Image (cartoon, helix red, strand yellow):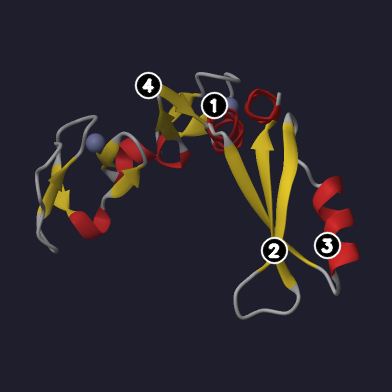
Amino acid sequence: MLGHLQKAGEGVECKVCGKKMDKAEAHYVTGYGYVCRKCGLVPVSCDRCGSMVRRLTTTVLRGKMLCLKCYSVERESGEKRVSRELSAENVENALQLALKGSPEGFILIGLRLKPSSTTLWIAEYEREDIFGMRCS
Ligand SMILES: [Zn+2]
Ligand SMILES: [Zn+2]
């Protein structure tokens, strides 16, 4: 329930069967809510690829129940920017890795060293259509 604050240790209700349980034994499905172990283990089909997965491994995004793989694809397609962490000795290597690792449909717009690190880099990408809009 939105805006409903729950104190630690308080009971939660399974969104599927309504069973009350301790928060510690409940499974949280992102975008959906708490489910009990029994309901969490029930196989459900992914709304995107149709594969059968256990409910507790799914994520609900924009009303669709997605398996882990589809979730990462959907999430990125809905986002204007994504970033990737990569490790490289120097900026040339980091740049090569960043370009090679570009997510589909994204353009590399930035590369910077992770704060307090000398070998971890953060590559930032922007969605191609957004990038085109901004630069045309
Ligand atoms: Zn349940
Ligand atoms: Zn899927």
- The image quadrant that residue 94 belongs to is bottom right
Q: CA distance from mark 3 to mark 2?
A: 9 Å
In the displayed structure, 14 sits above or below 110; it is above
Q: CA distance from mark 2 to mark 4?
A: 35 Å
Mark 3 near ligand 2 (CB under 8 Å)?
no
**Is the residue 111 above or below the residue 53 in the image?**
below
**How far apart in space, not on screen, are marks 1 and 3 (Cα)?**
38 Å
In terms of secondary structure, where does tag 4 sit? loop
Ligand 2 closer than 8 Å to label 2 CB: no
Mark 4 vs mark 3: give the one in front: 3
Are discs 2 and 1 less than 8 Å apart at CB?
Answer: no
80 on left or right of 31: right
Q: Are marks 4 and 3 in contact (CB under 8 Å)?
A: no
The residue labelled by disc 4 is: 63
Q: Which quadrant of the structure image shows residue 23?
A: bottom left
Callout 2, which amino acid?
Arg
Kindly state the secondary structure of the residue where label 3 is placed. helix
The mark nearer the N terminus, 2 or 1, is 1
**Mark 2 neighbour density, 10 Å: few (under 14) some (14–19) many (20 or more):** some
Q: Mark 1 sits on what residue? A: 52
Q: Which residue is identified by label 2?
A: 112
- The residue sitting at 52% across, 32% down in the picture is 53
Q: Are marks 3 and 2 in contact (CB under 8 Å)?
A: no
Q: Quadrant of the N terminus?
A: top left
